[in-house]
Amino acid sequence: MIAGIAALVAAYVLSQFYRAFLAVLAPVLEAEIGAGAEDLAAASGLLFLVFALAQLPIGSALDRVGPRVTASVGLGIAAAGAAVFAMAQGPGAVTIAMALIGAGCAPVLVSSYYIFARIYPAAVFGTLAGLMIGIGSVGNIASSLPLAAAVEAFGWRETLWGVAGGTLLVAVALALVVRDPPRAEGAGQGSTLDLLRMRALWPVMAMMVVCYAPAAGLRGLWVGPYYADVFGADAAAIGVATLVMGGAMVLGNFAYGPLDRVLGTRKWLIFGGNLGVLACLAGLILWPGAGGWVTLALFAGIGFFGASFPMVVAHGRAFFPPHLMGRGVTLLNLFGIGAVGLAQVATGRIHGALEGGAAVLPYQGIFAFFAVTLTVGMGIYLFSRDRTD
């Protein structure tokens, strides 16, 4: 299993890269092919929406076929999407490319979660899930300052061709080294509707909708245009800001992993962490033009405290029956990733509606959107039942 998990980690590095690379490419794409902030917000949102919609068939495939075929075929589709992006001549091609990338990356994380849930003790699931995202978030870092340097040195098209080739190689590795765990008794029986009937999952799913959207939405796109429009930042400065936020997200994933066992609670760990995100969003709303270390620290705080995604999955996983494990983790992924897609579309419209006035105004609207939705989700999550393994 070790070689297979290593290949899945490499695939997840690429998945994280693709979720966040538009923030750095935004200025050059607008200059060369006319893809503005709203175009890129729609394309980014489509990646997450396609990613989310793919979770339902992927869940069934994991339970019936296994992670080897599911993940390797998927990542091959992502490689094709990266190639389409490298040849893009306008915003439409970027949108098509992001949809293909979203569909292709959709099986990667849940395939690893499926393996963790099937072959390792339940008590360490949260730690393993956090490690997977923490190590995989190297892709988040790679899509910041290193990407900016590569684009400057080689050009954005050449860089994307290189990434497409690397993605195809990892897809082949997945097909060769991933090993499917033993099938659960009753695998293939039941359906996602059985999970939706479990009322204990409803508040967890509400938290899933809001916990990842602020960090993913801001790091994935808006931090770039925000720094460019408000502070006049160039690609190198945007690369530094995205690097700091991405690094904070990596540290947050490592920090969350073991804390449920240390503190003896998942619910209050998740709630407290997202309270930290809310505080940082409030700081950006109140001081949108602060700049310097203040703004950077607030974005880093959103990245660090907003890394509760694997812990929320662990909370929900504690309620899943073994034969529905694949569909369970993909259902939660659907809510988490789908919400990011919808949020990107919504924030793109907020940005467009508030443009034309003060430079900070569209971004205050975006920060407020994330703050309000997070508050609502946290309120619903208060009714959840705490459960650890």
Image: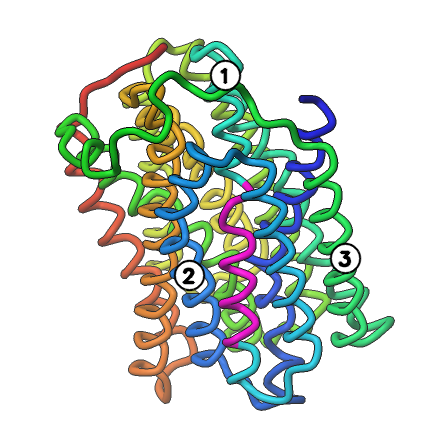
Label 3: few (<14), some or many (≥20) within 10 Å?
some
Please report the bounds of the magenta region as a residue range: 95-108
- Relative height, residue 280 to residue 365 (above, below): above
Main SS class of the magenta portion in the image = helix
Q: Position of residue 137 (x, y in %)?
A: 62, 42
- The answer to whether residue 22 is above or below residue 48 is below
**Residue furthest to the right:** 153
Query: Is residue 101 part of the magenta span, yes or no?
Result: yes
Q: For numbered disc 2, what is the local secondary structure? A: helix
Q: How far apart are the alpha carbons under marks 1 and 3?
A: 30 Å
Residue at image position (69%, 81%) is: 87
Figure check: 41 above or below 203: below
Q: Name the front one of labels 3 and 2.
A: 2
N-terminal label among 2 and 1: 2
**Regarding mark 1 in the picture, which secondary structure is present there?**
helix
Q: Residue 65, how many percent across, how many down?
A: 49, 36
The number of numbered discs placed on residues in the rendered structure image is 3
Quarter of the rendering occupied by the N terminus: top right
Disc 1 marks a residue whose amino acid type is: Pro
Residue 100 falls in image quadrant: bottom right
Disc 3, SS: helix
Q: Earlier along the polypeptide chain: callout 3 or callout 2? A: 2
Q: Position of residue 71 (x, y in %)?
A: 58, 44
The residue under label 2 is: 50
The residue at the point 60 percent across, 51 percent down is 73
Query: Which amino acid type corresponds to the residue marked 3 in the rendered image?
Result: Pro
Q: Position of residue 64 (x, y in %)?
A: 43, 34
Residue bearing the label numbered 3: 146
Residue, x 44% and y 10% (percent of image)?
Answer: 123
Instruction: Look at mark 1 in the image and give the residue it sits on.
Output: 258
